Structure formats: structure tokens, C-alpha cells
């Protein structure tokens, strides 16, 4: 397995590496060029809360050689614990930079997830700006995650042999599927992008720059989808910071 020397911070038993896009790209390049395989995962408050409740998910994050931060809440908590927090790398913005960089390196993708037609729209949107981008295949996330249909998805990915597989099932389903099947898949880098295809295709809109600068991106997302995200943000954020507080005072 390709190693790296990036600083590792830890919160609630989950590692978070102090990396930005340049470091992530460098690691991806090393793995692909050496024909290795690696999980490159991301954490935000929702991921942390799920990891508290699911030991297998916490184990998956610890097993991944690179875990980057994509949430302001995790950055605040790391700073509160005395760390110099890493940059926030959010798929809604990073996917364009990643795709452009991969096109220059001649790396290929497979997009897996989203509602029917969304992964294809995401591919088309990216190719409109990056015509030489290689997307070897795509498929929506609405398939049985075990049995014949699941095996057919795995067989297609293995036939196409993408350098990078991006999953967009949402947490924790994408992590659970990867945990079960990533070692069977003939790809090099495994990314968990959540709603990445919705943002790339334009189904979901990115937060305005002023809200991003004020670290209020979570509020914009909540306003876009209040039914689905109400519990995650309104109850999940206080729960997370309470757990961090308990860890900080040694009571967790």
C-alpha cells in the first residue's frame, strides 16, 4: 500500500489528514501510477455521527490511508481540540478541479450513484467544460446491493477498469457498499461523493460564495432540502459537538 507523510489528526476515534486538493491529487497519482488500490474517504459531521453509531464505519475510516475533511463542523471541532484544522474539500466544488486534473493525467472515471439519468448528466456537464475527460461508464444507484443485479454492476466496473470510482449513494450506504465490495473491484481509487452527481448535473445548486466564506454552507443545504436534512443538521450538529465536548474533558 502506498504510504504518505501527511499529518494525521483524530477526533472521536476517526482520523482526519491535514490535506488539501494538491495533497489529495498527489496521493491519487501515486496510487494509480504504482497500480495500487486505495480508499480515499471524506468526513463531515454526519459521517462522524454515523461512525459513532456504527463500529464498522469507524473501522473503515481507520483503514483508509487518506481521509480528508469536507465539513466546517469537523474543522471547528479539530480547532477546539487544539489542532490546526485542514482545509475543507467539498465535492460540489472539488469535482471540477479533480476532473480537469485527471484529464491532464489521462486518468479515467466510473460514476456510480444518484437517481436514474443524473450520473449521465453529471458526465455531460463535466465534458462540456473538459472535452477530453475519460468517463468509462456510469450507472444510477438504484439497484439491489446484493445478488445478481449487484454482481452485474461489479462485473461492468471490472470490465471497464476505471482508475477512479466515485460512489454517490449517500452516507452510510456508499461506505457500507464499499466496505463489502471494494476489494473485488478492478479500480485504483475509491471516492465517496454523496450528492456529487446532483451538484455536478445542476439538480442541486451550490451555496453562494458569501455563505461559504461565512461557513454557513450547511444552512444553505438545509434550506434546499429541509425534510431530508432537518434531523442531520438540527439534531446532528449539537449531538456531534456534545460528543466532542465529552471527549475533550475525558468523559467519553
Image (cartoon, rainbow, N blue to C red):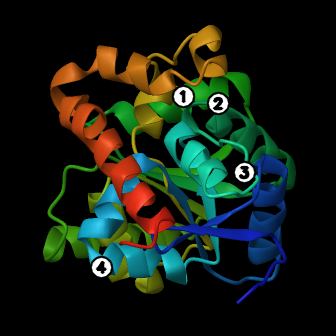
Residue position for label 3 = 86
Q: Earlier in the sequence, mark 2 or mark 4?
A: 4
Q: Where does residue 177 sit, x and y in percent of width and height?
A: 31, 70
Q: Residue at x 32, y 54 (%)?
A: 171
Q: Are marks 1 and 2 in contact (CB under 8 Å)?
A: yes
CA–CA distance in space, label 1 to label 2: 5 Å
Q: Earlier in the sequence, mark 4 or mark 1?
A: 4
Mark 4 residue element: helix
Mark 1 residue element: helix
Mark 2 burial class by Cα count in 10 Å: few <14, some 14-19, many 20+: some
- Determine whether 157 is above or below 118 in the image: below
Residue position for label 1 = 124
Q: Quadrant of residue 31?
A: bottom right
Q: Where does residue 214 sit, x and y in percent of width and height?
A: 61, 18
Mark 4 burial class by Cα count in 10 Å: few <14, some 14-19, many 20+: few
Q: Where does residue 78 sit, x and y in percent of width and height?
A: 61, 54
Residue position for label 4 = 55
Mark 3 residue element: loop
On the picture, is 182 further left or further right than 163?
A: left
Residue position for label 2 = 127
Amino acid at each position: 500500500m502506498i504510504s504518505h507523510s501527511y499529518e494525521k489528526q483524530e477526533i472521536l476515534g476517526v482520523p482526519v489528514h491535514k490535506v488539501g486538493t494538491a495533497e489529495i491529487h498527489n496521493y491519487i497519482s501515486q496510487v494509480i501510477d504504482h497500480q495500487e488500490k486505495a480508499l480515499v474517504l471524506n468526513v463531515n459531521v454526519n459521517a462522524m455521527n454515523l461512525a459513532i453509531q456504527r463500529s464498522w464505519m469507524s473501522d473503515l475510516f481507520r483503514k483508509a490511508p487518506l481521509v480528508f475533511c469536507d465539513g466546517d463542523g469537523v474543522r471547528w471541532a479539530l480547532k477546539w481540540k487544539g489542532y490546526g484544522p485542514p482545509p475543507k474539500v467539498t465535492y460540489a466544488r472539488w469535482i471540477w478541479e479533480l476532473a480537469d486534473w485527471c484529464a491532464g493525467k489521462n486518468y479515467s472515471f466510473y460514476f456510480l450513484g444518484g437517481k436514474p439519468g443524473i450520473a449521465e448528466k453529471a458526465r455531460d456537464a463535466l465534458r462540456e467544460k473538459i472535452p477530453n475527460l475519460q468517463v468509462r461508464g456510469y450507472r444510477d444507484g438504484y439497484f439491489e446491493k446484493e445478488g445478481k443485479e449487484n454482481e452485474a454492476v461489479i462485473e461492468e466496473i471490472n470490465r471497464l477498469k476505471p482508475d477512479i470510482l466515485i460512489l454517490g449513494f449517500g452516507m452510510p450506504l456508499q461506505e457500507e457498499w464499499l466496505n463489502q465490495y471494494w476489494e473485488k473491484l478492478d479500480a485504483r481509487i475509491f471516492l465517496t461523493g454523496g450528492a456529487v452527481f446532483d451538484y455536478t448535473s445542476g439538480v442541486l445548486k451550490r451555496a453562494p460564495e458569501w455563505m461559504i466564506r461565512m461557513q454557513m454552507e450547511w444552512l444553505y443545504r438545509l434550506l434546499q432540502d429541509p425534510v431530508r436534512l432537518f434531523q442531520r443538521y438540527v439534531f446532528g450538529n449539537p449531538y456531534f459537538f456534545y460528543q466532542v465536548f465529552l471527549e475533550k474533558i475525558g468523559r467519553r
